[in-house]
Image (cartoon, rainbow, N blue to C red):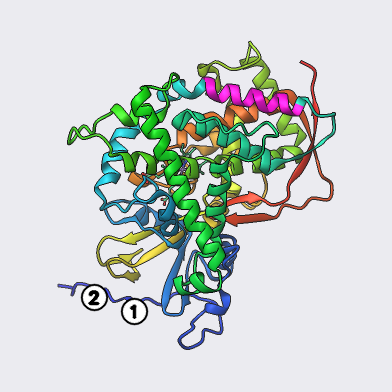
Amino acid sequence: MSKPVRIKAKDRVLPHPPHRIPLLGDLWDLHITDSSQWGMKGAQRYGDIYERNIVGVRVTYVSDPDLLIEINDDRHWSKFLGVPIRNLREIARDGLFTAHNSEPNWAKAHAILAPSFTAQAMRGYHQTMVEVAGQLTSLWQGKPSGSWIDVSADMNNTTLEIIGRCAFGYDFDSFTDSGEHALVSAMLRELRYINRAAYSHPLVEKTVFRNQWKQHHADVQMVHALVDDVVATRKVTGPGGKGDLLDRMLVEADPETGELLDDANVRNQILTFLVAGHETSAGALAFALHYLSLNPKVVEDARREIETVWTDGTPTFEQVSKLRATRRIVDETLRLWPVAPGYFRKANADTMLGGQHPFEKGEWVFVVLLQLHRNALWGSDAEEFNPDRFLPERTRGRHPEIYRPFGVGMRACIGRQFAYHEILIVLATIIKNFDIEPDPDYTLQVRETITLKPEGLRVKLHPRRA
Ligand code: MNH
């Protein structure tokens, strides 16, 4: 009989950057402002499983699709709140995205909210999405043909309007020149702060960055108070009219316990949707416009289909899922630039990953989606933008773990259908109404603020005749 394998973290030997030094480890090789892209480059140098040791903390990077068969299985590995996500808890506390599996509010909120995020539930948000896409179109059509468009800014406004209205009936009035809404300014300032201070120490924050730190705490309080106020008002006035997520959260009970979400948790969920459902979709749209500006042939194919499907100029609910070519553009964009560039998982028990890498219970890995999506299984042209990869005949038989832009398992993105529905509507509306001209001087530069976005991207738009 063979002896059971002993799992000892110290027996785990993985490739790592050269010149590892005592105590500090690979600290010299830590990149804070582009950590995911650096994680991808590391995989290209050291392999699909490697590590960096940061002052004794071992960070394991995984992008091997076969290892992901184990890691993506909730029975063996589960969601871990890595530093960037843990820091978001200051805003969203035990909201869906930032809750530990063990917190009772996760299962409760998931059960209450899941029915509001099915493909069919998108009927309820469809009209709002079409309206916002229409407002964006009017804004752009009002500019002289050939005006420069700040892509990230306009996409952020678009998705913020959509999620604000669909989550809690809130109109941020982003498309007028009335200035940024106070809630938006505070929230964006918080996100920037959290991002900047991600690996800092409270003592440093309270001294060196004292003013920022105070502002941050004031912002957290202000944002919480503002949303609490909306919730309190809604409880008095009753349903908001169009039937948003807030309405549902105030009346839907957990099927297990019969309990409603408490008020603080309702607020945490609204902030979660604003944070998780805003810059992600906006980033996806911005990257898509970058590639479309460079690939007129892809635009043409998609446009032909849009014009056949949208018989009335704007889409009905059913017509959105018929936009196969636009959908392939979105899928290919999220392959190259999964705007949530990775996720963390921790071992539920001592385990021998792939039969050869020992991980003790609680040890964690970072899944490098950016590299997984460029794996050799995608072909030798994996770096190129080619929506045809997502033609049905080419996706059939694909490795099951080779494409995970929305994560996986019980903690996968609850907003996936929402994201597809809004992105398809907005992108198809743009393709239908505008020709997109690239900035010849632009080379793609990707900025990381937890999510990815194309830095400094601008395009010229030329309205098309109806
Ligand atoms: Mn989203 C979780 C990607 C749009 C709300 N989202 C996740 C995860 C990924 C992700 C990856 C899993 C993270 C992890 O395992 O730690 N999300 C995306 C992408 C887009 C996106 C690529 C758009 C493109 N997400 C949205 C939208 C919403 C949303 C839109 C809301 C309307 N996402 C969530 C929530 C979670 C999540 C909530 C957490 C779900 C849970 O843990 O129960």
**Circles 1 and 2 in contact, beta carbons < 8 Å:** yes
Locate residue 104, reporting x and y percent.
24, 47
Closer to the camera, 379 or 214? 214
Res 6 label: 2
Q: Which residue, given by chain and number where applicable, does mark 1 sit on?
A: 11
Q: In the image, is residue 137 part of the stretch drawn in magenta?
A: yes
Above or below — where is 314 with respect to 337? above
How packed is label 2: few (under 14 Cα within 10 Å), some, or many (20 or more)? few
Residue 254 numbered tag: none
> In the image, what residue occupies the spot 85% across and 29% down?
144
User: How many circles with numbers are drawn on the protein?
Assistant: 2
Looking at the image, residue 429 sits to the left or right of residue 105; the answer is right
Does mark 2 have its CB less than 8 Å from ligand 1? no
Residue at image point 53% right, 23% down: 128
In terms of sequence position, does the residue under pointer 1 or pointer 2 come before the other?
2
Q: Main secondary structure of the magenta part?
A: helix
Badge 2 amino acid: Arg
Q: Is residue 261 left or right of residue 19?
A: left
Residue 402 position in % (x across, y down): 48, 49
Residue at 66% over, 39% down = 179
- Residue 276 at least partly seen: yes
Mark 1: few, some, or many residues within 10 Å (few <14, many ≥20)? few
Q: Which residues are magenta?
A: 127-140
The reply to whether residue 66 is visible in this rendering is no
Looking at the image, the residue that sits furthest to the bottom is 22
Q: Tag 1, which secondary structure?
A: helix
155 part of magenta stretch: no
Closer to the camera, 30 or 393?
Answer: 30
The quadrant the C terminus occupies is top right
